Each structure stands twice: as structure tokens, then as C-alpha cells.
Amino acid sequence: MNEDWVHCNKCFRSETPLSFYLSRCQHIFCRECLASVCPICGANMKAIEINSSMSSEMKLAFEDIEKVFERMKRIVQFQWMQRSSLEAAKIPVVVKYMEMQKDIKRLRKGLFLLNEDANKEKYKFNKARENVEFLLR
Ligand SMILES: [Zn+2]
Ligand SMILES: [Zn+2]
């Protein structure tokens, strides 16, 4: 960790051989300026040493912004590529689904017309039967 902007927020020293500590209130101190209460904001001091054994989440705060952006760009491209591959695979299924929907619509219409015809025939048949019954009376 030798970022040029890392410095003690109290005494402003930034010599690299010094150890620096990051507090939970996001202030940075050298070992000499560490206190039980943060000298900047008055919060209870809870600090960890800034070094390579910090959690990756903490390390991220000290990374070169340009490199972070570069990595983000690659992640975005990678995920976009993966998503579009999945979308492309879905297209034939979607097309098939739409065709099936059209078929269903057509079949429904056919069924409706058949029902209409059947009703007309039933009506005619009933009329004819009424006539026959009338004649046989
Ligand atoms: Zn200091
Ligand atoms: Zn503080």
C-alpha cells in the first residue's frame, strides 16, 4: 500500500515507512496519532492497519480508480456478452411460442365457427322435428 494520497489525518505525515490505520469513521492515522477517540470527528476509535492483509472489501477503497474502472468495464462487457448469448438462445423458443399462440388462436376461431354451425344445424333439426311432430299429431 503506497498510495500517494494516504496520510495521517491529524499530523499529515505520509512517509511510506510509517504504518497507517483506517478508522471505522473513515479517518486515517499514523500509529502516533491513534487514540481511543477519533481526534477528527470524536467517534470511538476502532481502526485496522492499512496493509495487504486487509479484507478485499477494505483494499478496494485503496485501489487505483483507473484500474477499478478498467476492471468494471471488463466485468460489464463480460456480463453483457453472457446475457446476450442467453437472449440469443431464447429467440428460437420465443418464435416457436408465438407461432403456437397463432395456431391456438386459429384453432379457437375454427372451433367457434364449428360450434356456430352445429348450433345452426341443431336449430334446423329441432325445427324439422317440431314440423314432423306436428304432422304426426
Ligand atoms: Zn499522525
Ligand atoms: Zn473520525
Image (cartoon, rainbow, N blue to C red):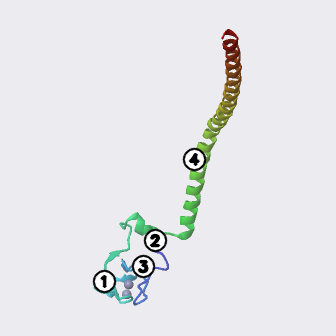
- At a point 58% along the width and 43% down the height, the residue shown is 86
| Callout 3–callout 1 Cβ contact below 8 Å | no
Residue 56 at x, y = what percent? 41, 64
Amino acid tagged 3: Thr
Q: Quadrant of residue 91?
A: top right
| Ligand 1 placement by image quarter | bottom left
Give the residue at mark 4.
82
The residue beneath circle 1 is 44
Nearer the N terminus, badge 2 or badge 1? 1
Q: Is the residue marked 2 within 8 Å of ligand 2, measured from its CB?
A: no
User: Disc 2, disc 4: CB below 8 Å?
Assistant: no
**What amino acid type is highlighted by mark number 1?**
Asn
Circle 3 sits in a helix, a strand or a loop, which is it? loop
Front one among 30 and 88: 88
Badge 1 or badge 4: first in the primary sequence: 1
Q: Residue at x 40, y 90 (%)?
A: 11
- Give residue 128's position: percent from left, percent from top: 71, 15
Q: Marks 2 and 1: CB-CB under 8 Å?
A: no
Q: Which residue is mark 3?
A: 16
Q: Earlier in the sequence, mark 3 or mark 4?
A: 3
The disc, 3 or 1, on the residue closer to the chain's N-terminal end is 3
The residue at the point 67 percent across, 17 percent down is 130
